[in-house]
Amino acid sequence: MTDPELFSHLALQSVEGVGDIVAKKLITHFGDAESVLQAKSHQLAAIDGIGAVLLKNLKDPSIYQKAQSELDFIQKNGISVAYFQDETYPERLKHCFDSPLLLFSAGSIDLNNRKIISIVGTRQITSNGTEFCKKFIEDLVPLNPIIVSGFAYGVDIVAHQLAMEHGLQTIGVLAHGLNQIYPKTHKKFMAKMEQNGGFLTEFWSTSNPDKENFVRRNRIVAGMSEATVVIESAEKGGSLITANMANDYNRDVFAVPGRVTDKYSQGCNTLIKTQKAQLLTSAADLVYHLNWDLKTSTKSVQKQLFVSLDPDEQKIYDYLLQSGKEMLDSIAIDCQLPTFKLSSLLLNMELKGVIRPLPGKLFEAI
């Protein structure tokens, strides 16, 4: 996008009463943002939903001053901008009707990787939640997914830190402009985040981390990801809002179950009970349900002449050698293993390069 085009989009965004949906509607009608701003009053008034107040606001000259101020900030700070029709805009987010018109980013974000998951949860993460998050991300490393979260306290920052520790790209979606960071105590993570991904926001530098902005932020977290994972959540909280948005966008949602007496398992248990989330006990559950292919990951690992298998893995391997292609349920029954355990074993065996997944959720020995 050229600077004049960006200026026009910023000017349109600064019009009071013009949100993302209205802006896209106007651009679709007139062709581009500049044409919207240059349109005659009678042309604008002919569009459904454009009343007298909005028409007046569209002709307010102050929108150009605001746009120039924000454009100066973007240029001075080397901010990247993605228009909702650009190739650099998150592909899945394009298909959300209320996605942002513009996204501002800082860092080294590369969205060519299609394996994008969001990890969310309570700001008061427990030791159990931390341990699960550690094992979960560690097991996903061979698939090299992008980890998205909100850079908040608790589950968010733990997920970001673990992703960075394992060399995974991680993206923090912010509820304010790129001129600040919230919470301020997380400023120490910014440099490393920008080396391993970075930050995304729809908000201008004039925006503060106001309460309503976090809800808007959550739709980006949910919309740009293939799946949303809720690690821990109380009965109410922002992570449940994100999970509901993900459901509305027809995304997969996973929740980690917990004891009924644990405060920060209530939200997850409710999501599972109401069938708004798949039960998640390990990375294998996510890999299985999303049908992620491990072939590209195992190709880069030199195949070992001898692979060490534990007794259960050996049982599965021998069974698949004899039976050929089999579905997970059949393997579980014939090998007398519970499905939740089998999913984890199959993932480990795929990583060792001794079995491979096939279309239709079949598995075979290599």
Image (cartoon, rainbow, N blue to C red):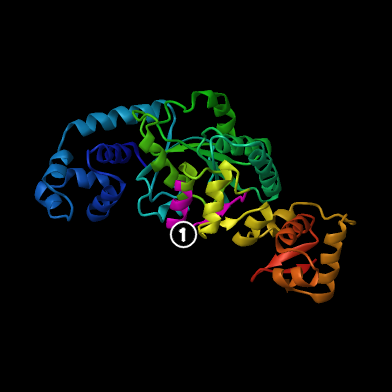
In the image shown, does 301 or 116 lie closer to the viewer?
116
Q: What's the residue type where badge 1 is placed?
A: Asn
Where, quadrant-wise, is the C terminus in this rendering?
Answer: bottom right
User: Which residues are the magenta region?
Assistant: 241-258
The reply, left or right, for residue 155 in relation to residue 72 is right
Residue drawn at point x = 36 percent, y = 54 percent: 97
The reply, left or right, for residue 208 in relation to residue 183 is left
The reply, left or right, for residue 352 in relation to residue 149 is right
For residue 291, say whether it is visible.
no
For residue 139, say whether it is visible.
yes
Quadrant location of residue 206? top left
Q: Secondary structure at mark 1?
A: loop
Position of residue 177 measured from the top left corner of the image (x, y, whole percent) = 40, 31
Residue drawn at point x = 65 percent, y = 48 percent: 144
Residue for badge 1: 250
> Farthest right residue?
306
Residue drawn at point x = 44 percent, y = 44 percent: 218
Position of residue 231 measured from the top left corner of the image (x, y, whole percent) = 59, 45
In the image shown, does 21 or 245 lie closer to the viewer?
245
Position of residue 136 measured from the top left corner of the image (x, y, whole percent) = 67, 46
In the image shown, does 9 or 271 lie closer to the viewer?
271
Where, quadrant-wise, is the N terminus in this rendering?
Answer: top left
Labels in figure, total? 1
Position of residue 170 measured from the top left corner of the image (x, y, whole percent) = 57, 40
> Farthest bottom residue?
323
Residue drawn at point x = 61 percent, y = 61 percent: 289
